[in-house]
Amino acid sequence: MKIGVGVAYYGGMNVEHAECSRQLLREGIPIVEIIGCAYPEMAQAEIARQALDHQPEVVVFIAHDMVFTAKDVRAIAELALERNTLVS
């Protein structure tokens, strides 16, 4: 399954979240980070636009303060594909 991940940062990044992002990169899951966008909808639209270039099967949007693992991201993506819908 080809997954893409997007995160929009409106403020600072905490250390735990930064390590989670690095883990995704180590596991080969690409991540788009939009930094300093005051409007969440604009950041998500830009993430979706950039995802079109790589054509992932699923794009997972992660909050800027969320702590997660690559396993969590894969589980969310699998659920979204299984249900063929948006999962939150």
Image (tube, grey):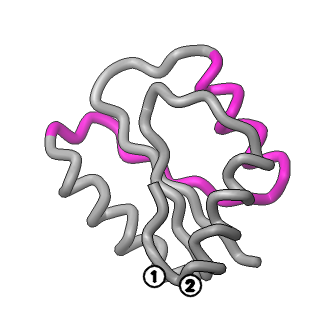
Quarter of the view holding residue 8: top left
Q: Is residue 5 left or right of residue 34?
A: right
Which amino acid is tagged 2? Gln
Question: Looking at the picture, does residue 19 appear above or below residue 63?
Answer: above
**Viewer-closest of 34 and 61:** 61
Instruction: Characterize the local packing of mark 2: few (<14), some (14-19) or many (20 or more) Cα atoms within 10 angstroms.
Output: few
Q: Disc count in the image? A: 2
**Image coords of residue 76 (percent x, y):** 63, 58
Q: Give the residue at x 48% y 45%.
A: 62
**Image coords of residue 9 (percent x, y):** 36, 34
Calculate the distance from the C-alpha at mark 1 to the C-alpha at mark 2: 5 Å
Secondary element type, mark 1: helix
Question: Looking at the picture, does residue 47 appear above or below residue 12?
Answer: below
Residue position marked by numbered label 2 in the rendering = 55
Residue position marked by numbered label 1 in the rendering = 52
Q: Is residue 81 left or right of residue 71?
A: left
Return the residue found at the far left: 39
Quadrant the C terminus occupies: bottom left
**Image coords of residue 40 (percent x, y):** 22, 47
Which amino acid is tagged 1? Leu
**Image coords of residue 52 (percent x, y):** 45, 82
User: Given contact means CB atoms under 8 Å apart, are the residues at marks 1 and 2 in contact?
Assistant: yes
Q: Is residue 27 magenta?
A: yes
Magenta range: 16-38
Q: Give the residue at x 70% y 69%.
A: 78
Q: Is residue 65 left or right of residue 19?
A: left
Quarter of the view holding residue 44: bottom left
Q: Give the residue at x 71% y 47%.
A: 72
